[in-house]
Amino acid sequence: MERIIGVMGGSGVYEIDGLQDASWQEVNTPWGPPSDSLLTGSLDGVRMVFLPRHGRGHVHTPSTVPYRANIDALKQMGVTDLVSVSAVGSFREEMAPGDFVVVDQFIDRTFARVKSFFETGCVAHVSVAHPVCERLSGLAYEAARSTGVTVHKGGTYLAMEGPQFSSVAESKLYRSWGCDVIGMTNMPEAKLAREAEICYASIAMVTDYDSWHPDHGAVDITQILSTLKANTAHAKSLVAALPALLSAAYAPCEHGCDRALEYAVMTAPDKRDTALVEKLSTVAGRVLKG
Ligand SMILES: CSC[C@H]1O[C@H](OP(=O)(O)O)[C@H](O)[C@@H]1O
Ligand SMILES: Nc1ncnc2[nH]cnc12
């Protein structure tokens, strides 16, 4: 098996540079079409697949991003390691706009999204106690550091439904919960990556102080966009640094991300919905076949 790096580009990151033999490929999935075509190619001898989460031109809202289709499409392309790059607001003075944060925990406050590939007829329960891959996150941290940007190792990301930003009261509440950053998309993406046995890491690019900060006022989309513009070059250099850090030779994940489904499926083989099992063939075929 080969190591293939996936990159999920968030707001402001709609392409990556420098891929050899780059081509946009249309991929279909049993969960509908993904956000856009997938850009495939290789860098430093490692195959890479890029998908703009909101689609080129920013078409999908955080609630309507086709999360299941995106993860299924990346799995179809053989992605073993997925690095998400996302814009976030910060709840910490020291996590300033322009900084990067390697997220290691999530609080999922989204409520209008399908969060699992599994449903009636094929039930599975995976652990997301440690929702990111420690090894991949460590490498993403090294890649971010190599760009010269200020990077914070570890942080709790509050996933909100959006698309509106938080009220001041909500912002203060999330801060009091110990959250470090806020965004609208890493859930259910991280949960679905775990179900699909793909190692997942999340790099958050701080664009603003959300609404809690007495000196910064409410979130302002123009400020977000100008910070994002300034950070896009760092995000692209980070992505370019990944292949040299992750060797192309595949090795099983030492944290078990690639075996998350091993004992997860509860539904007895003779009770499984055959149509659903067929839909699950890409993400869960390893444990459902035979
Ligand atoms: C552009 S501000 C709000 C928007 O940006 C973030 O997107 P992503 O996580 O894909 O970088 C945030 O989650 C919202 O969707
Ligand atoms: N303050 C904020 N809240 C939610 N998502 C964001 N993305 C960037 N800034 C954000």
Image: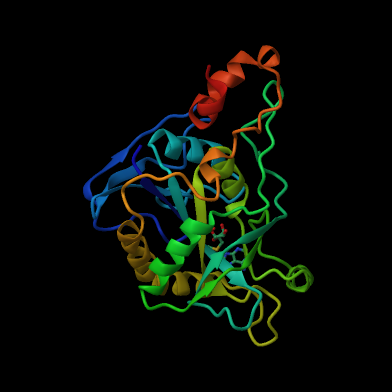
What residue appears at the point 55 percent right and 45 percent down from the top-left corner? 256
Way the structure is coloured = rainbow
Instruction: Place residue 77 in its image quadrant.
Output: top left
Q: Residue 169: horizontal and vertical position, in percent?
A: 79, 71
Q: Residue 220: horizontal and vertical position, in percent?
A: 58, 73
Say above or below: 42 vs 289.
below
Instruction: Place residue 252 in its image quadrant.
Output: top left
Q: Residue 287: horizontal and vertical position, in percent?
A: 56, 26
Say if residue 145 shows up in the picture: yes
Say if residue 65 shows up in the picture: no
Front in this rendered view, residue 262 or 231: 262
Front in this rendered view, residue 97 or 59: 97
What residue appears at the point 32 percent right and 63 percent down from the top-left corner? 241
Q: Residue furthest bottom?
A: 215
Q: Residue 161: horizontal and vertical position, in percent?
A: 68, 53
* Image quarter hosting the N terminus: top left
